[in-house]
Image (cartoon, rainbow, N blue to C red):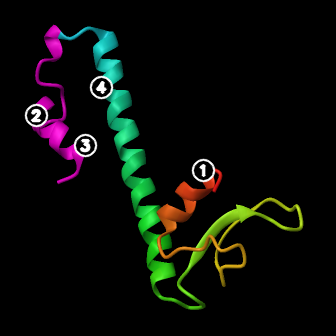
Amino acid sequence: MTVKEQLESILCSPDGEFVFEKWWSEGDKKVLREVFSKLEEMEKDTERLDFLQSLNDKEIYTGKCELRMSTTGRGWRLHETETFSGKACRLVRTAIDNFMKGE
């Protein structure tokens, strides 16, 4: 069960309405709707990253990936590579984290 589904099971009736709706302000309801929306986006992001990881796991080339700026100045690259910079790793999330940290 996803986090969103868990929250809905606690906070919502079977018809999707907030259980304690009559006691909540419109501001509270708005915040909860925004939280649910963010949780849905996070789940989609997880699916996207899992998909990229599944591609890397196939080891079509090396099974190592890297996120870096292009050496020709044409943007950024997330790609399976032969560890030219020595920063390539097996996990897509780690490659992204390393780039975010400036490594």
Dots 4, 2 in contact, CB < 8 A: no
Look at 56% across and 80% down and name the residue there. 64
Q: Is residue 27 above or below residue 14?
A: above
Residue 75 on image: x %, y %:
80, 59
| Nearest-to-viewer mark from 1 and 4 | 1
Q: Secondary structure at mark 1?
A: helix
Identify which amino acid the numbered label 1 is placed on.
Met
Q: CB of mark 2 within 8 Å of CB of mark 3?
A: no
**Residue at mark 1 to residue at mark 2: CA–CA distance:** 36 Å
Q: CA distance from mark 1 to mark 4?
A: 30 Å
Q: For numbered disc 3, what is the local secondary structure? A: helix
Residue 78 seen in render: yes
Q: Earlier in the sequence, mark 4 or mark 2?
A: 2
Mark 2 or mark 3: name the one nearer the start of the chain.
Answer: 3
Query: Hey, what amino acid is under mark 2?
Result: Ile
Q: Is residue 30 left or right of residue 82?
A: left
- Above or below — where is 6 with respect to 56? above
**Sooner in the amino-acid sequence: mark 1 or mark 4:** 4
In the picture, the quarter occupied by the N terminus is bottom left
The Cα atoms of the two marked residues, 1 and 3, are separated by 27 Å
Instruction: Write down the residue under mark 3.
Output: 4
Any magenta on residue 12? Answer: yes
Asked if residue 69 is among those painted magenta in the image, a careful observer would answer: no
- Quadrant in which the C terminus is drawn: bottom right
Question: Do callouts 1 and 4 mark residues in contact (Cβ within 8 Å)?
Answer: no
Residue beneath disc 4: 32
User: Magenta span covers which residues?
Assistant: 1-23
